[in-house]
Amino acid sequence: MSDLDADPGGPTRNRGDQERAGREAADPGGFARDLRAAVRGDVDLSVTARALHTMDASNYRRVPVAVVAPRDADDVAAALAVCREHDVPVVPRGAGTSIAGQATGVGVVLDFTRHMNRIVSLDPGERTAVVQPGVVLDDLRSAAAPHGLTFGPDPSTHSRCTLGGMIGNNSCGSHSVAWGTTADNVAALSVVDGAGTPRRLARGWDAAPEGLRALVDGDLALLRTGFPDLPRRISGYALDALLPENGTDLARAFCGSEGTLGVLTEADVRLVEAPGARALAVLGYSDESAAAEAAAGLLPHGPLTVEGMAADLVRETSQKSGLPKGGAWLFVETGGARPAEARARAEAIVRAADVLDAVVVDDPAGQRALWRVREDASGTATRMADGSEAWPGWEDCAVPPARLGAYLRDFRALLTDHDLRGTPYGHFGDGCIHVRIDFDLLTREGIARFRGFSEELAELVVAHGGSLSGEHGDGQARAELLPKMYGPELVGLFERVKDVWDPADLLNPGMLVRPAPLDADLRFAPLPREPVDVVFGYPHDGGDFSAAVRRCVGVAKCRTASPGSPTGVMCPSFRVTGEEEHSTRGRARLLHEMLAGEVVTDGWRSTEVKDALDLCLSCKGCRSDCPVGVDMATYKAEFLHHHYEGRRRPAAHYTMGRLPRWLRAVAATRTARIVNVLARVRPLAALGKRLGGIAAERAVPEVAPRTFRQWWRKRPRGGGRPDVVLWPDTFTDHLSPSVGQAAVAVLEDAGLTVAVPPRGVCCGLTYVSTGQLDLARAVLRATLDRMEPLLDAGTPVVVLEPSCAAALRTDLAELLGDDPRAGRLAASVRTFAQAVEELAPQWQPPHVDRPAVGQTHCHQHAVLGDAAERRLRAKAGLTGELSGGCCGLAGNFGFEQGHYEVSKACAEEQLLPSVAAAEADAVVLADGFSCRTQLEQLAGVRGRHLAEILAEGIARSGPADRRRGRS
């Protein structure tokens, strides 16, 4: 598997902890029995659970023995007691988005997100809340918002990070210039220490473990002089919080201890008053150093944020359109009681700043769009502009804000010296820099460079008076280098403090003190070095399936309770089940472990991977919504192809997966009416669905008695060279020909000559979604053969079904990358609205003048974009916004046995509520056949394609030359 001598990515000095857990892994019976007997929560030693928790968002990987989801503090104490008895290490974990490796371990992982996730109380008068460690930050903020309050620290992962994780890392976020770190906002903590003793930490020595005060009193001079004075000093233990002049604050000292001193079971946190209104000033500078040097000068103006990022982190043209001119930007947020007050403060900052350009945004939607650009940088930065990989490791160093510009120049020079690249961004107002660097963590030479650079950078940070960690903690990434920052005497004191709290070294060993080497346990070490034999081309990953899977770095944007934006999609199955294995990240983790072969040992035949992918809707939402562009729909198709190669497939693959063949046979034999009658006979329908792998709850859609092609052939039409080719996809042709007929009416009213391609063309969608990739390739090659004359003519191809258009845009070229015609066909594809806008720009649609509701199709959102559709709707007087999310039917997914409840729940998240709340005269838009079917079957509502609405308007008003795009 690896060509590395002595496995430099494997355990070395941390071997003792591996052996402790290894003894239980070899004979887990007694340990598992005792754990299950003691803990009322969930105890999981399955392959799936262990594989899902091998990694966090760092470069590191460890295989746990078990995953425990405790129900309460008593469960935590019970689990710790069993682990002490069996000498098994314990790692507390929230959302698993830590970047330094501290949320990985070889023993028991405590998952607090499943049960210990309640807001126990919230007191608006006192501005406090009591929370369990698994509470997601955004849930706390949502609960506080009606009272005009919020929790100040807000990492970019606020939609999924937990308060326990934030306390463990002493997290900060973009508003720390105003509201400080998590430690600044904690009043008291309930914890269980390594010896099993519950403690209530606040001010004073009352709850301190025996011996801690003596250690502090014995080294007062060291504690008073050994810590740098800067706002983002997160590295090491915050022992200076125990000094008498600092109030002897045990709770504050515990923050940032990364689960090494005790396990948090409850927290009393302080809330801050949220501004009634906010404005965002985005300031443009020539480069990041200029932005960094300007940041400290803005602090006297009292901003809520001073965030910085450079232009090479903004990859999407649509995102750049909202930014002012410049090579780098500062995001400076201001607050006020009223919008005018917030805006005035933002404009004052613009006037005071020496900038190339600036923009002030005070509408909430515009601010959210700009903040998403900044927040997505944590994922975008994992790929360089040329597509090469970049990794954390020196993710969040901090220096005094006034020294940030000089530090960045030295940092850039050090990158150059080591022939490395990285794009800094982050909390410029606090002097804290995030950066992903294109380390080669796969080869011996690359790992040696990683270590050498890390050692030199640590010295550079210290020379500038900084902290190795300014937000994400030390973990394994930086703890080995803490002597460079604190010196051996203070680091020795850290070790003695750890021993007082956790004498058996039970809690997160190898982190922060007595650390594992920074170049051990690397997540990539067990992956195959030779390319995996796959069918898709993976052009964005150099044809390497391992590199495609490595895209997931664990920032877990997929692990949220909402799509993340009004039009977002990812990840519908996780939002329904709440299970990690049904998130995009969870599935990527299982694929990683499948390739590694250590935990998931049966490769493409893995039932664990198959089960996790089973509830993937192939919506492709992750392709656009994941900051690093993970494409789980493609990975699922690839896996299913190999999993069932040479084996019998599920019945649904033969029925729905080969739907184009069955429907063509029905059309050829003209038996549509007979099929429809038989489908209405309940016993026959039930038998057919059971044999065909179709959910019993589903009604089988009616087949059109006359296909679109049959209508087209009998329709009088003129000759001449066509302006557009209208693609007769399977769904339009056989199941909803009225959509195709309407599209012809609109296109011709716009002055365009329409042609239909020869019979036998197919996008291969149903074959791809069921992983029948050999059939898909054969179908697509035949399609290219038939389409070649039209491709030679350069005629645009209009595809009415978004999922089919997406398949032609992406799957076609990735399956047949060796055929130049594939790229030509993909480039010729237009959606209905894109074709009208591009080819008939002067045409005016009929003025429908009605509100519109519905849902943007997942594939439209993820692959095609809907800007042209929005503009066409506006020109036609269709008002209102379509919702995001997923309809849940998703082609064959919602029809398959075992998927009905999940499919229904997906629809109930956004689509069905938006339709139910619509005005009586609202038009229900649904360009996808699946979306229309779901609406009809679950809500009794008829959804229609945009082409149908426009065609009806044309029929009512009659032809009008003013609407025609003719010269």
Image: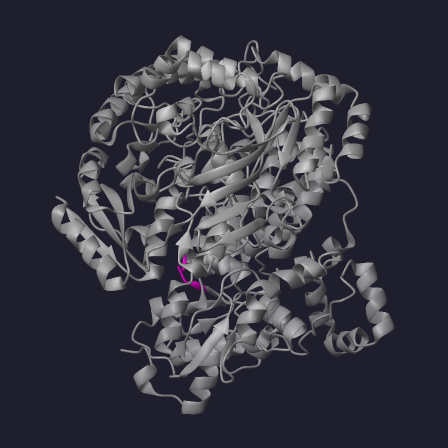
Q: Is residue 630 above or below residue 838?
A: above
Q: Position of residue 608 (x, y in %)?
A: 71, 38
Q: Position of residue 730 (x, y in %)?
A: 61, 65
In the image shown, does 903 or 803 lie closer to the viewer?
Answer: 903
Where's the N terminus, which quadrant? top right
Residue under the point 55% across and 28% down: 207
Q: Which residues are magenta?
A: 792-797
The answer to whether any part of residue 93 appears in the image is yes
In the image shown, does 847 or 39 lie closer to the viewer?
Answer: 39
Residue under the point 81% across and 29% down: 33
Q: Quadrant of residue 409?
A: top left
Q: How many marks?
A: 0
The answer to whether any part of residue 817 appears in the image is no
Q: Is residue 814 left or right of residue 903?
A: left
Residue under the point 53% across and 76% down: 917
In the image shown, does 133 or 323 lie closer to the viewer?
Answer: 133
Please tell me whether residue 795 belongs to the stretch shown in magenta: yes
Please tell me whether residue 788 belongs to the stretch shown in magenta: no
